[in-house]
Structures are given as C-alpha cells and as structure tokens.
Image: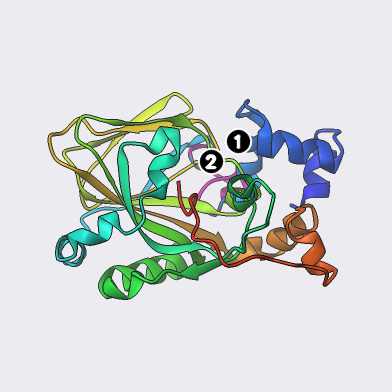
Amino acid sequence: MNLVEFAQMFGCSVPDVLNKLRNGRNDFWRWWWSQFASEQVGVHHGSLDRTLSHFGRLMNGIDVAPFLQEIDEKPRNWLVNTKRKGIGVQQHTDSITLRRAEYNFVPGANNIDIMMDVQESVTGQLAGQYPRLMSFLNGFSEQIGKGALSRAMIVRLTPRMQVGRHWDSGYYYLCRDRYHLVLRSTGSDMECAGVRRTWNVGELWWFNNNLWHSASNGGDDWRIHVIFDVLPHRNVPLVDEFKRHTAYYQPRMEGQVQAGPPMEGLLDAR
C-alpha cells in the first residue's frame, strides 16, 4: 500500500495523512500504518495475533557472550559520542553507534527535526571493532527482517533508571521495523501503547516504536541492548515516496543543493 491508497482508505489527502503520521500524538494513525508497512505484523500475515501485537519475540537462546566480549573489551567507546544524552527521554543512556544517518548539515535549519526524515544510513567508524555483532545483525536483517540493516547502535541504560515515554517520529521510522537484541539485563521492562513485556538476555524482539513506548532498568547493573532498524525490501518504493514529500530531498532532486558538512546524527537510533 502506498501513501495515496492509505489516505484514500480514510478519506484524507496525502498531506493531511502525512501530518497525522509524523506529528499526531494519537497512536491511531501510526498503528494502522504499521499494519501495512511492517514486515513482522500486519494484515498481510492473515493472523489476528500478528495484526494486534505491539511486540514480537523472534529469537531466544542466542549466545550473546561473543558480542559482550567485543563490547567489554572497549569501554572507552561508550564516551566517544555522548550527544544522545541531549534527548530528554534518553538522558540516562550511553550509546555506541554502529550505523548512523548519512546526512549533511543544513545551515539555519532545525537539523534535529530534519534528521528524523533522512532515509540513508552509513556504517559508523566504530562498527569495524564489532565484527561478530555486525555479522549477526546483517544476517538477521536479510534472513528474518527480509531487508537491509539501517541505523544501529549499542545502548546501555543506567541502573534503576528509565527511558521516558515517547514515540519515534519521522518518515525514516515509518518505513522500517525496529528490533532489540538483549545482551545484558536482569529483565528489561518494556511498555508499548500500554502493553507491558519483560525481555530477557539472549532474546531478540520486534516492537512497534511508532507507538508511544517506554523502558526501565530495575536492576543494579547496566542494561545493554543492541537497537537496530531494518528496511524491508518491499518498502523500498515507500522510501522514494516519502522522499518526494520531504523538504530535505526536494532541492537535491532538483540538483540545487548547497549542503554543509556531514553530520554525526543525534537521533541515529532512539
């Protein structure tokens, strides 16, 4: 389903439905959009459970020891880029960027807001230090995510702290599925649209980050997850469609861009 068909289904114009999907505080529109855009849930599965679900555990019993070894051997990497702490709901987290938004700074613009709509991703400078983890993420993305790895990061949450309630706003997220691989935790408490689940070490979950959600770490040690997005192959045409409605891309499509330097993304993966 494309944007025109989705808008027609609700008797809306495309600009109206784009505003509701990106900026509306009500989950209604993004929940319906997920039924068509997500690889893991939706009406195309012909299953009521997979249509109504906000969460999905796709793998368990994963041996995470090799991934933790790669991470624990390089503790200084947690402090290479601390910009993510500038996001209010993420102030208690640290992160290591594996793949980030490929983005050029636009002088005089709200670059944080623009980045939410940037579709391209590029491998970060630190990714080469995590070869086993990167191999796993790429393999999962192709085989189970049925797509290509987009943004990805390793994120740790301070003991006894929370990630505040929010939804991931932007056209980038509306084309992709969000996944978490649990590496270290005493039980990760997750909430999405009022539904709660506890995720455990060695599990890999899909969840609908287009809806309001939050997370907490009730333990006395860091909670470490790999958070990553996958662009399903069947959604590639949607990327092009969203680009046509995104101000950032319009001068580029017309060959009139005067971009600034590449920008390391604050919102690489929220």
Percent across and percent down for residue 17 are: 77, 37
- Taking 170 as reference, is 163 above or below it? above
Task: Using residue 86 as the reference point, say whether residue 211 is left or right of it.
Answer: right
- The amino acid type found where label 1 is placed reads Trp
**Label 1: few (<14), some or many (≥20) within 10 Å?**
many
- Distance between mark 2 and mark 1 Cα atoms: 13 Å
- Residue 185: x and y in percent read 19, 43
Front: mark 2 or 1: 2
Q: Which residue is mark 2?
A: 168
Q: In the structure shown, which secondary structural element does the residue marked by tag 1 occupy?
A: helix
| The one of 84 and 72 positioned closer to us in this rendering | 84
- At x 82% / y 72%, what residue is drawn? 255
Residue that lies at the very extreme toward the front in this rendered image: 108
Can I make out residue 167 in this image?
Answer: yes
Q: Is residue 63 visible?
A: no
Residue annotated with mark 1? 31
Question: Residue at position x 60%, y 52% from top?
Answer: 115
- Residue located at (59% from left, 40% from top): 169
Residue 43, given in percent of the width and then of the height, sits at 62, 44
Q: Earlier in the sequence, mark 2 or mark 1?
A: 1
Quick check: is 42 in the magenta stretch? yes
Amino acid residing under circle 2 = Asp
Q: Look at the image and give the residue range highlighted in magenta.
A: 39-49
SS type, badge 2: loop
Image point (50%, 49%), residue name: 267
